[in-house]
Image (tube, rainbow, N blue to C red):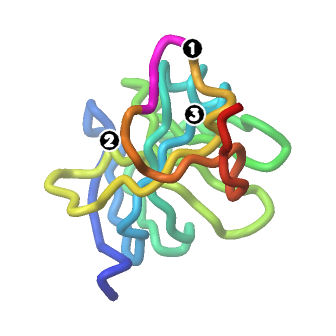
Amino acid sequence: MSEETKSVSGGCYCGKVRYRASYISAEITECHCSQCRKQSGHRYAVTSTKSGNVTIEGTGNITWFRASPAAQRGFCATCGSHLFWRSLSDDDMAILAASIDEPIGLRLVSHIFVEDKGDYYTITDDLPQFTGYDMPYSPA
């Protein structure tokens, strides 16, 4: 484990799903796409890892929703807490930052899909902004 990775634990609001994750990125990205906003009610703040680094207790209480042809999102079937995003084509997985037990020692580093953000808020920090996963955003 390095300064770029952490080991964390977390879970849902009601406690029926708990997880431990090793080698997660110490960086948090906020996604502003319409899928993330629709599902969570605002924006997604996530950190990344590989699904092989995550051990889940209470897997029978997770509902997986196929959000697109590329990914699915996992949430607690009882309390509705948003917990995971995972790729359907490889081992990539994201953990929602708010589900991690504090203190987490992670830091917000960027915003993605900012052209799709809601018109009811403004991004006010100086962190890098991207139109997709990696294309820098240049406001007109």
In the rendered image, residue 122, in percent from the top left (x then y), is placed at 45, 24
Residue 121, magenta (yes or no): yes
Does residue 136 appear to the left or right of 51 in the view shown?
Answer: right
Q: Is residue 6 visible?
A: yes
> Where is residue 124 shown, x and y percent of the image?
38, 33
Asked if residue 71 is positioned above or below residue 90 in the image, the reply reads above
- Residue shown at 57% from the left, 33% from the top: 32
- Whether 106 is drawn above or below 68: the answer is below
Left or right position of 135 against 58: right
Nearer the observer, 114 or 99: 114
Circle 3 residues within 10 Å: few <14, some 14–19, many ≥20: many
First-in-chain label (2 vs 1): 2
Q: Secondary structure at mark 1?
A: loop
Residue mark closest to the camera, 3 vs 1: 1
The amino acid sitting under disc 1 is Asp
Q: Which mark is residue 119?
A: 1
Residue 38, quarter of the rendered image? top right
Residue bearing mark 2: 98
Q: Which residue appears at 56% of the width and 25% of the height?
A: 37
Label 2 and label 1: CA atoms lie apart by 23 Å
Q: Which portion, as a residue range, is magenta?
A: 119-123
Name the side, left or right, on which 64 lies relative to 16.
right
- Locate residue 47, reporting x and y percent: 45, 57
Marking on residue 32: 3
> Label 1: few (<14), some or many (≥20) within 10 Å?
few
Label 2 element class: helix
